[in-house]
């Protein structure tokens, strides 16, 4: 599988979101997913956007929306994003009361189900839950704000998740979020990440589409160099 790049619009111009998504849309080369950070001012100390904005974005782009819900009580609110047509809906393991039931509801509503863990949250207690999920979002900054520094310690969790996938225990796609840029993406790719969220590295660049291409190229080179991928990870999906 080629590395997937998911620009986070948290760092885009919120008055021009459709244009900002168009700026990273290039068939074959541009963004694979658009990462949408939903923050409620409770689970994280920041407030962004919610379902009405996501519904408008769904009508404005063909790209799959990757909704990252940094909210309390996702058991109540997450399914609405799936029902509206989000491609992947990620909830936080620290916030979900019944993550297995929630994953089933998300899938029944037509979305992929994602589970995210904050930098300080261990992976092991959530491994069995992840058997019900399609994506694992490993946070490499404290959730809440773009533009923070990458926390390399989380790569141990990525390596563990990669092993669990490669040995067939899990089938999740491994995604990383926070501080991914031209300097950090190679280490994440070597550790086994499949999908890279990048906010400031894309929307802080003069040419966001070029930044996406450059990030993908670096990730691709690093996962080749690693050589521990298995035959499958370098093939185009
Ligand atoms: C942080 C968000 C991230 C953020 C990433 O809570 O979940 O998606 O936008 O931004 P950068 O890439 O600038 O760290
Ligand atoms: Zn995010």
Image (cartoon, rainbow, N blue to C red):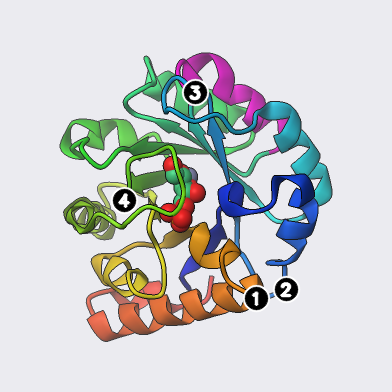
The picture places residue 219, in percent across and down from the top left corner, at: 40, 75
Quarter of the image where one finds residue 180: bottom left
* Distance CA(mark 4)–CA(mark 3): 20 Å
The picture places residue 55, in percent across and down from the top left corner, at: 76, 35
Label 4 near ligand 1 (CB < 8 Å): yes
Label 2 near ligand 1 (CB < 8 Å): no
Q: How many marks?
A: 4
Label 1 near ligand 1 (CB < 8 Å): no
Q: Is residue 62 left or right of residue 47?
A: right
Name the residue that disc number 3 marks: 41
| In this view, the mark in front (4 or 3) | 3
Question: Magenta residues, as a range?
Answer: 71-85
Earlier in the chain: of badge 2 and badge 4, it is 2
Earlier in the chain: of badge 3 and badge 1, it is 3
What residue is shown at x 30% (from left), y 65% (from top)?
188
Give the number of the disc on residue 27.
Answer: 2
* Distance CA(mark 1)–CA(mark 2): 16 Å
Magenta part, dominant SS: helix
What residue is shown at x 43% (from left), y 37% (from top)?
144
Quarter of the image where one finds residue 107: top right
Q: Are marks 1 and 2 in contact (CB under 8 Å)?
A: no
Near mark 1 (Cα within 10 A), the count class, few <14, some 14-19 or many ≥20, is few
Name the residue that disc number 1 marks: 207
What residue is shown at x 43% (from left), y 54% (from top)?
147
Name the residue that disc number 4 marks: 140
Is residue 134 at least partly visible in the picture?
Answer: no
Check disc 3 and report its element: helix, strand or loop.
loop
Earlier in the chain: of badge 2 and badge 3, it is 2
* Distance CA(mark 4)–CA(mark 1): 24 Å
| In this view, the mark in front (2 or 4) | 4
């Amino acid at each position: 599988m080629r590395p997937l790049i998911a620009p986070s619009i948290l760092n885009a111009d919120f008055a021009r979101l459709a244009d900002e998504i168009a700026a990273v849309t290039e068939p074959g080369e541009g963004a694979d997913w658009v990462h949408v950070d939903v923050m409620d001012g409770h689970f994280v100390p920041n407030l962004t956007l919610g379902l009405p904005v996501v519904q408008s974005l769904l009508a404005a782009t063909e790209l799959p929306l990757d909704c990252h819900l940094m909210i309390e009580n996702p058991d109540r609110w997450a399914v609405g994003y799936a029902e509206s047509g989000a491609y992947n809906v990620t909830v936080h393991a620290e916030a979900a009361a019944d993550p297995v039931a929630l994953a089933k509801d998300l899938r029944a509503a037509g979305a992929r189900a994602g589970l995210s863990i904050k930098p300080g949250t261990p992976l092991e207690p959530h491994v069995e839950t992840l058997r019900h999920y399609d994506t694992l979002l490993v946070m490499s900054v404290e959730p809440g704000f773009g533009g923070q520094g990458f926390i390399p310690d989380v790569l141990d969790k990525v390596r563990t998740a990669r092993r669990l996938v490669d040995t067939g225990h899990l089938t999740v796609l491994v995604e990383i979020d926070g501080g991914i840029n031209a300097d950090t993406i190679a280490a994440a790719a070597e550790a086994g990440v499949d999908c890279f969220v990048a906010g400031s590295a894309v929307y802080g660049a003069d040419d966001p589409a070029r930044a996406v291409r450059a990030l993908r190229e670096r990730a691709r080179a690093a996962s080749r160099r690693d050589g521990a991928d298995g035959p499958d990870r370098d093939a185009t999906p």
